[in-house]
Image: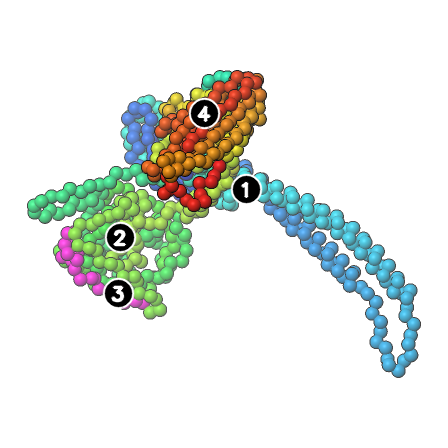
Amino acid sequence: MTVDPAQRWNSTLDSVVVYAQGALCRRLVRGIVPPDGRVRVTGLPRSLDPGSLRAAVLGASGVRVTEARVEVEAGTPGTGSPDALRREALRLRDAHAAAQGRRDRQLGLIEEVRALHPVPPVRNPEDPHRRTAVDAWLELADFVDGRLAALHARLVELEEALRDAEHELGIAVDRLARASTDAPSAHVETTVSALLTLDGAGAAEGDGEVELELEYGVPGAVWVPAYRLTHRQGDGDGRLVLRASVAQRTGEDWTGVRIALATADLRRRTDLPKLRSVRVGRRQPAPAPSGWREPPAGLGDLFTGYEAAGRRRQVPTAVPAGLRVGSAAGPVPPPPPPAPAPALAPPSMPSAAPAPQAYGALPVPGGTYGAPPQGFGGALPDFAQPAPAPPAPPRSAARQRGGPGAPAGPPAPKAPAAPGRAAPPAVPEPAAGPPQPSGAELDYAGLVLSGPEEPGGRRGRLFPGSPVDPAAAEHRRRAEAVGSLPLPGHAVRPRESAGSFDHRFDAAARADIPSDGTWHTVTVGEIPVGLRTEYVCVPSVEQTVYATLVLSNATGQALLAGPVEVTVDDDFLLTAALPTLAPGGVRRVGLGPAEGIRVTRRTNLRESTSGLRNNTTVLDHHVHVELANRLAAPVTVEVHERVPVTSDPDVRIEERAAWTAPEVGEGPEHHVSGTRIWRVDLPAGATTALDGGYEIRIPAGKALVGGNRRS
């Protein structure tokens, strides 16, 4: 076992920003910088996204973070690990299986006793008829009846015990499913930590402690807005409390953290596009990518000693390169016979750091870049006796075959496949010109050094490796299952209601949200809104008056769509659906029918003709609406009517009423063409009548035979 040289610092979760999918967590850590500057920050969740880790030093202490990487450690869980629910569920599952087994055995006994019946002996045809032993038959029937009665009574008890066991097991399974995922779910506990390298430790020694900030993204967190509206009749304003239903299964409990809610997409790309310049003139070579170096000279001689030593069986020497932390130390298939040392092909990624001198290999000359992969380990392959390898070609020949910027030459000779083994995969020849490394190839912490068992074109070079934590994908999959939770009533996803704009809401106080995958309500803050009560009716569709609240948003922050609990005069009224309310917008929220206001509507249609030769059909519509206010307060009622519209210039529509046509953008809702509105102020206990109408004049050439008869 090796002792971790890095000093361990404990971190505290300070704030969380929950996005539409996922969350961004911020941790604070304090400590004294060690002389070597290596610090391991513990307490990170298992579902952490390694590519999202950011570290910074708070304050002007002269210390800066030069490297930050994620590492996974395995260990035995402590004695105080909260797995009592898991053990209880296993115990109840065993108890349920035992109760079910007892019930099944009882059913088997009942079937055996039920199968008892008298069987007469086989009669010889020559023997005379014998009398039936009726008493014996009756005694057997009495025995079967009594035995079955006792067995059925016992069966009732066993079935009741089985139902109780099923009920208790269901409760335990439900508690386990809703329990926090902050506890480890396996016998081997895996912990995630951030390994930091700090520079400028001498500047911080005099100041004492240094405060660091860690920021990382995690999946498995969602939220939807919710509201509580308090209003008093007659007042022109109200209290709208913004709340949020938050569910998270990130693997860590959010205890006493500052919560912020955002509608943005956490996984949206934020990098800027690169526009390359277009030049007129002589062709210029493309510049080498930043962070790339040409492989050092003598790379082909790195494994000469390894090839000359021959294949031996289970040589307990250095560990071969090509394996990294987290790889399984299992049996490795024997490598193919070595090929002649290939020419130095143009690299497609940064060169490796000096490799360990394994199997008598020579050290790699030349400089290094970045940080080499750390922690190689694994099982040694079996070695057999190969043929001696020819000497490597000189440096000049390597550059003639495939140096940077040179055309691709003929491929290197391939080694024949060993008997009983498949040939190694062919390494494609690189394209001519300078290398074009990808983002994964420039991720120095994620590169893996290829060992001697790799083909000749990959030996001693760095390539993108596998993820550090193989179980991280499973943790992220379980965390992302929170996105499929059923939404509360009238709830809308933030991305659906926010539209093309993104908003952020900061909670006024700290909150606790466990990692159990269920909805938890968090109070964000109070938003001042303008309110007025109006009554709307459309008597041509339904002769019912509806109460509404007209909300006006005078703040600079949008209100997203979601459920709103309406309380009027300290009495809970109902839960309605609040539409999205932009800054400065006005929307209407329905409160249901108002039983204290009555409306009736009657219509009358008269058809006649006019004109010199009665060639124009006149349809005269008369509308009569009556309103009665039975409430103890004055009200304002909007009566909506609709007149027909036409696109034919020969058909004329003449209106005769005091109604008005709403202007474009007027009012809290959108009105269709032809809408007309009456606004009536009714005192308490008052009634009023509204009369209106319109005439439709249709030329005879536009009329249909038998048509135009409508109310």
Question: Badge 3: few (under 14), some or many (20 or more) residues near its Cα, within 10 Å?
Answer: some
Q: Residue at x 42, y 31 (%)?
A: 694
Give me the C-alpha separation between circle 1 and circle 4: 57 Å
- Indicate which disc residue 460 carries: 2
Amino acid, disc 2? Gly
Question: Badge 2: few (under 14), some or many (20 or more) residues near its Cα, within 10 Å?
Answer: many
Q: Which residue is mark 3?
A: 415
Question: Badge 4: few (under 14), some or many (20 or more) residues near its Cα, within 10 Å?
Answer: some
Q: Is residue 217 above or below residue 428?
A: above
Give me the C-alpha separation between circle 3 and circle 1: 56 Å
Q: Is residue 457 above or below residue 682?
A: below
User: Residue 427 lies in magenta, yes or no?
Assistant: no
Is residue 313 found left or right of 278 in the rendered image? right
Q: Residue at x 22, y 41 (%)?
A: 274
Give me the C-alpha separation between circle 3 and circle 4: 93 Å
Q: Which residue is mark 1?
A: 177
Q: Which residue is mark 4?
A: 678
Which numbered disc flags the more N-terminal residue, 3 or 1? Answer: 1
